[in-house]
Amino acid sequence: MTSEQPMIALHGVTRRYDDGPPALDDVSLTVSAGECVAVLGPSGSGKSTLLNLVAGLDRPDSGTVTVAGTRLETLGEAAAARFRRAHVGLVFQFFNLLDDLTVLDNVLLPAHLAGAARRPAREHAARLLDSLGIARHADAYPGRLSGGERQRVAVARALINRPALLLADEPTGALDTVAGQDVRHLITNLHATGQTIVLVTHDLRLAADCATRTIGMRDGRVSAVSPAGSPAASAMPGSAGVTV
């Protein structure tokens, strides 16, 4: 990817899962390197479908999805998995940690799958855990941690392969107020280091605190776009076929 290319570029993307309305309907958007973008909208608006397409977990029925200079819709499943390991970090609402692995081993798992050398990977994992304030839990198991601590482990795991892009699906959705505030601070600090982040969220506070731009979705289409500090995009009136 050159400096002139966007980190994410979707052009005319449509995705259908059945005979009903499309989950995404002719969506075009770009995200530049270094942005933190929050995708807002009601359930069923297409947010998660958008995230899955950008992650290479799904393919469009039409249109193109380019991430870090790679056309994802042209990749087979194995190639898409290799691409994710190299370029994309994923953070989920319910953490998706493996309870029978320690915190350190959970963080190291993507590095092992990518074939990283063991010693440098462990050193990097230790630095991540330290920077996220959970180094003392390296040998603990996830079930013994609080929700906020588990989400920090999930973020460390997402960052272990130094991804160009971090995708977070409702990262505060399963957390209490205090833990949610901790994760908001964490995402804000990550963005300050230059990390490109796309958040799918219902948490308007997360969007307001962390995002440089919000993208509102409704009925599978981009309905509105707003810069940081402006009203929530999901509350704005919709307009079909918006390109952002």
Image (cartoon, rainbow, N blue to C red):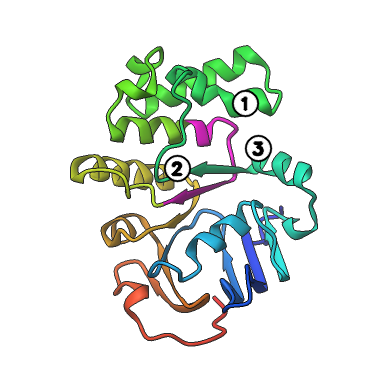
Q: CA distance from mark 1 to mark 2?
A: 21 Å
Above or below for 200 versus 11 = above
Amino acid type at image mark 1: Ala
Tell me the residue at 67%/27% (across/down). 113
- Name the residue tied to disc 1: 111
How many residues crowd mark 3 within 10 Å: few (<14), some (14–19), many (20+)? many
In magenta, the rendered stretch is 157-169
In terms of secondary structure, where does tag 1 sit? helix
Q: What mark, if any, has residue 64 been given in the picture?
A: none
Above or below for 163 versus 22 = above
Q: Nearer the viewer, residue 94 or 36?
A: 94
Amino acid type at image mark 2: Thr
Q: What mark, if any, has residue 85 been given in the picture?
A: 3
Q: Position of residue 87 (x, y in %)?
A: 64, 43
- Name the residue tied to disc 2: 193
Residue situated furthest left in the rendering? 178
Q: Is residue 46 left or right of residue 87?
A: left
Q: Position of residue 210 (x, y in %)?
A: 34, 54
Membership of 161 in magenta stretch: yes
Q: CA distance from mark 3 to mark 2?
A: 21 Å
In terms of secondary structure, where does tag 2 sit? loop
Tell me the residue at 44%/34% (across/down). 154
Tell me the residue at 29%/68% (across/down). 229
How many residues crowd mark 1 within 10 Å: few (<14), some (14–19), many (20+)? many
